[in-house]
Amino acid sequence: KQPVIQIPVVFHVIYHTPEENISDEQIQSQLQVLNEDYRRRNADTVNTLPAFKKLAADTGIQFCLATIDPTGKPTTGITRTYTDSLGFTTDEAMKFTAKGGHNAWDANQYLNIWVCNIQNGFLGYAQFPGGDPAIDGVVLWYQTIGKFPANPYVSVFNQGRTATHEIGHWLGLEHIWGIKDFGCEDSDGITDTPPQDNANSGCPTGTINSCNNSLQGGDMYQNFMDYTDDACMNLFTQGQSAYMQAIVSSARPGLLS
Ligand code: ARG
Ligand code: ZN
Ligand code: CA
């Protein structure tokens, strides 16, 4: 069994309004959600469908706020930047000080998470392993951070699982239904997640057989890499865990030292 991997995280809070300047408490809550979800210590593991219980995994990956900044000085692991920008798109402006955001910390050593007002309806997005280090990391809409009531918003995305999902991408995971929307030919490349046609949403119950997958238990719509509501997702699989562990060693080895 592999030793637990501890990933240092920096949250770059980019705000225009006071609401966007989220509290330390909200960020602490997000860290707690990540550590519960990735270590399978989330309270809702009891909801995992019986067919998937034995596949559900402790990924062996956990997260902490950075304690030393790139210059070697002590840090809270949170930067706060006032911006003139009323909202950001996926053009990566939030990742550059010169564009109203904040530059990345060395992506070999930190997981950079930018928290801002994303204006085009995205909850968040991530860069996959192997890309430009200057934009490496995860971007999250400020209203998705942490878990209610530390996250004060009334929404089906107020339990901090957008971060769980996006960090899954950052560690190389595809959506559970595969590379392209619709179609049973493509896959996520993970053998223990059943083949699935397209995204599920809301809060499904019972068995959904989108791709002749009944022998594997049907769609694994409770997987963090589907599109269901925060309250209705609760697992990564053994296969996904092994994949993320391998990605850290191969594509993000600096995080291990
Ligand atoms: N739509 C986003 C993506 O494709 C995130 C979905 C997050 N889902 C959630 N229940 N928080 O990456
Ligand atoms: Zn996604
Ligand atoms: Ca699969």
Image (tube, helix red, strand yellow):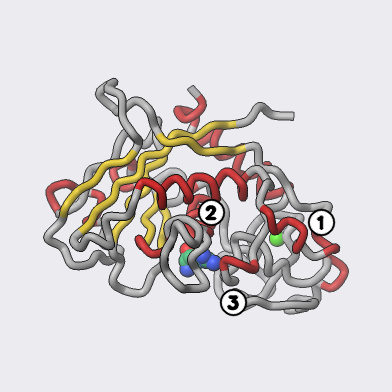
Position of 122 with respect to 80 (left or right) is right
**Cα–Cα gap, marks 1 and 2:** 19 Å
Query: Residue 142: percent from the left, percent from the top?
Result: 35, 60
Label 1 CB, ligand 3: below 8 Å?
A: no
Label 3: how many residues lie within 10 Å, few (<14), some (14-19) or many (20+)? few
**Which is more N-terminal, label 2 or label 1?**
1
> Mark 2: which amino acid?
Thr
Which residue in the protein does label 1 denote?
53
Q: Residue furthest right?
A: 215
Considering depth in this image, is 160 or 169 the residue closer to the camera?
160
**Which is more N-terminal, label 3 or label 2?**
2
Which mark identifies residue 164? Answer: 2
Position of 85 with respect to 14 (left or right) is left
**Cα–Cα gap, marks 3 and 1:** 21 Å
Residue drawn where x is 64% and y is 64% of the image: 233
Label 3: which secondary element:
loop
Which mark identifies residue 201? Answer: 3
Quadrant of the rendered structure where residue 205 is?
bottom right
Considering depth in this image, is 106 or 76 the residue closer to the camera?
76
> Mark 1: which amino acid?
Lys
Label 1: how many residues lie within 10 Å, few (<14), some (14-19) or many (20+)? some
Query: Residue 240: percent from the left, percent from the top?
Result: 66, 49
Residue drawn where x is 80% and y is 77% of the image: 207
Residue drawn where x is 87% and y is 69% of the image: 215
Label 2 CB, ligand 1: below 8 Å?
A: yes
Considering depth in this image, is 31 or 3 the residue closer to the camera?
31
Position of 173 with respect to 128 (left or right) is right
Quadrant of the rendered structure where residue 10 is?
top left
Residue drawn where x is 83% and y is 52% of the image: 54
